[in-house]
Amino acid sequence: MSNVSVPPPRITRATLLEACQRLAQRDSDLAGVLRLYGPPPLWGRSLGFPTLVRIILEQQVSLVSAQAALARLVAQAGPLSPERVLALGTVRLREAGLTRQKTRYVLDLADRIHRGALDLRHVSRASDDEARSMLCEVTGIGAWTAEVYLVMALRRPDIWPTDDLALAKAVQQLKRRRRVPSEASVQRIAGAWRPWRSVAARMVWHFYLSRLREARPRSTASGTARRARSAAD
C-alpha cells in the first residue's frame, strides 16, 4: 500500500483550464472544441455513499430510468445512508423498484461501509489504482462504476471510464469515424491525452452536448442538456 497521508490531486477550475490548453496544443480536434465551445463546466458529484448508489443505479439503463429508481429509493429511505438502506432490506428495496441484482449491489455496498470494510474517506485519499481496487471489491461495482466515481466525485485528473458507450459515441463524432470505435480503440485514442484523460473526457462530452444543442430544436436540446448536467451533478 502506498502512503495515503497526502491526498491525490483533484481537478479544480484552474487546473481544468490549464489542462484544456495543454490538450488543445497536443490534439487539433480538442483545439477545435475549445475554440468553438470554450472549456467544459467543472461537472462533479458529491463524495460518499449516495453518489455511489446513484452510479450503481445508472449501470446499463437510461438516465431517466436511473433517476426514477433513485427517486423511489429516496422516497422509501429518506436521505440515503448505509444504515437507512440496510434498514429497508431486500423486500422494501424491491418494492421501491430496484431490480433483484441492483438490490444486492446496493445492500452489499451499504453493509461494507456500515461494517467498516469499505472506508470512503480512505478511498478518497488512495491512489487511482488503489481506489479503483477498493471500490471493485463491492459486489456489482466494476471498472466503469469505480471510474465514474473517480472522475466525477473524486475529480481525479487522469481517468477514462472503461466501456462508456456515450463517450465512445462522442469520440466517434470528434474523430469523424464511420462507426463507434471499439473499447480498445477508444482507450488508444484516450492514451494520447495522458495525464489529463479526465479533462479530455469532459471536453469530449462538452463537444457532444454542444453539438446536440445545435442540431435539435431549442426545447428538446435544453431538455437533453439538463439531463446531461443532472448526470454530472
Image (spheres, helix red, strand yellow):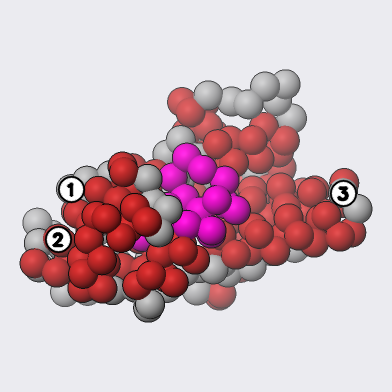
Q: Which residue is labeled 3 in the image?
A: 216
Amino acid at dot 3: Arg
For the image shown, how many numbered marks are present on the structure? 3
**Mark 1 and mark 2 in contact (Cβ < 8 Å)?**
yes
Q: Which mark is residue 112?
A: 2
Q: Nearer the viewer, mark 2 or mark 1?
A: 2
Q: Which residue is labeled 1 in the image?
A: 137
User: Residue sitting at 47 percent across and 50 percent down?
Assistant: 58
User: Residue sitting at 38 percent across and 77 percent down?
Assistant: 78
Amino acid at dot 1: Glu
Q: Is residue 105 above or below residue 80?
A: above
The residue segment tinted magenta is 53-69
* Residue found farthest to the right: 217
Q: CA distance from mark 3 to mark 2?
A: 44 Å
Q: CA distance from mark 2 to mark 1?
A: 10 Å
The secondary structure type at the circle numbered 2 is helix
